[in-house]
Image: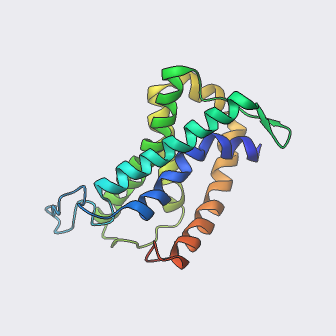
C-alpha cells in the first residue's frame, strides 16, 4: 500500500522541494502588498520555482511512465499507470502543478492570518500541496483519480506524507536550501 501511494504521489512530492532548490528570482506576486499591509505571497514563491518545480514533477512522472513500459511492478507490488498518451500527461502535470498551487494557496492564507514567511502551521504545511494536487487532478481527470486514489491509498498518503515532509525539510535545511527545518 505504501509503495503504491508513494508511486502515485511522486509527481506531487517532488515539485515543492525542487522549487526551493531551483527557485529564486522574480516573485510571483510581483512584490504586491495587500490591503492588510502584508505581501500577497512573499519572496519564497517565484516564477522560476514554479516552472522548475512543475518541470521536475513532470520529469519524474515521465520517468515513471518509462519504468512502467519496462516493468509493471517494484518489490513485487504492481504499480498503477497514469493513463495513456495525453491523458497521462495531464494527470502528471496536474499532480505536479497542483502541488505547487496548493502550497501557494496556503501561503496566501497564512499571510492573511498574520503568519510570516516560513512560520510553521502544523498539519497544514504538510498536506496543503497534497490537497492542491488532488483537487486539480480530480478536476482534470476524475475517473482516473477515483480509480487510483481509493480510501486506503488516501489514508496512506495522509499518514506517510507528514513523515516524508518532515524528513525532506530537515534535509533541505541542512543542505542550505531552506531557512527553517519545517
Q: Residue at x 76, y 32 (%)?
A: 71
Residue 121 horizontal side relative to residue 111, left or right: right
Total number of numbered labels? 0
Residue 165's place in the image compared with 156, above or below, is below
Pick whichever, 13 or 127, lies toward us.
Answer: 13
Q: Is residue 170 visible?
A: yes
Residue 109 horizontal side relative to residue 100, left or right: left
Q: Is residue 149 visible?
A: no
Q: Residue at x 73, y 30 (%)?
A: 70
| Residue 10 picture location, percent across and down | 60, 46
Q: Residue at x 38, y 56 (%)?
A: 106
**Residue 41, quarter of the rendered image:** bottom left
Pick whichever, 30 or 32, lies toward us.
Answer: 30
| Residue 23 picture location, percent across and down | 36, 61
Residue 10 horizontal side relative to residue 28, left or right: right
Q: How is the image coloured?
A: rainbow
Q: Residue at x 46, y 36 (%)?
A: 93
Position of the N terminus, as image quadrant, is top right
| Residue 61 picture location, percent across and down | 56, 39
| Residue 66 picture location, percent across and down | 63, 33
Amino acid at each position: 500500500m505504501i509503495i503504491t501511494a508513494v508511486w502515485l504521489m511522486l509527481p506531487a512530492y517532488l515539485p515543492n522541494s525542487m522549487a526551493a532548490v531551483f527557485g529564486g528570482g522574480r516573485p510571483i506576486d510581483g512584490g504586491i502588498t495587500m490591503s492588510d499591509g502584508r505581501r500577497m505571497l512573499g519572496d519564497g514563491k517565484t516564477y522560476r520555482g514554479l516552472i522548475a518545480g512543475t518541470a521536475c514533477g513532470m520529469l519524474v512522472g515521465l520517468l515513471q511512465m518509462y519504468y512502467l513500459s519496462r516493468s509493471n511492478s517494484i518489490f513485487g507490488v504492481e504499480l498503477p499507470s497514469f493513463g495513456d498518451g495525453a491523458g497521462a500527461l495531464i494527470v502528471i502535470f496536474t499532480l505536479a502543478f497542483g502541488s505547487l498551487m496548493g502550497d501557494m494557496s496556503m501561503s496566501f492564507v497564512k499571510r492573511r492570518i498574520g503568519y510570516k514567511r516560513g512560520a510553521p502551521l502544523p498539519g497544514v504545511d504538510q498536506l496543503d500541496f497534497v490537497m492542491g494536487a488532488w483537487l486539480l487532478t480530480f478536476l482534470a481527470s476524475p475517473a482516473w483519480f477515483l480509480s487510483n486514489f481509493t480510501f486506503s491509498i488516501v489514508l496512506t498518503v495522509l499518514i506517510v506524507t507528514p513523515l516524508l515532509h518532515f524528513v525532506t525539510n530537515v534535509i533541505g535545511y541542512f543542505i542550505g536550501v531552506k531557512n527553517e527545518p519545517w
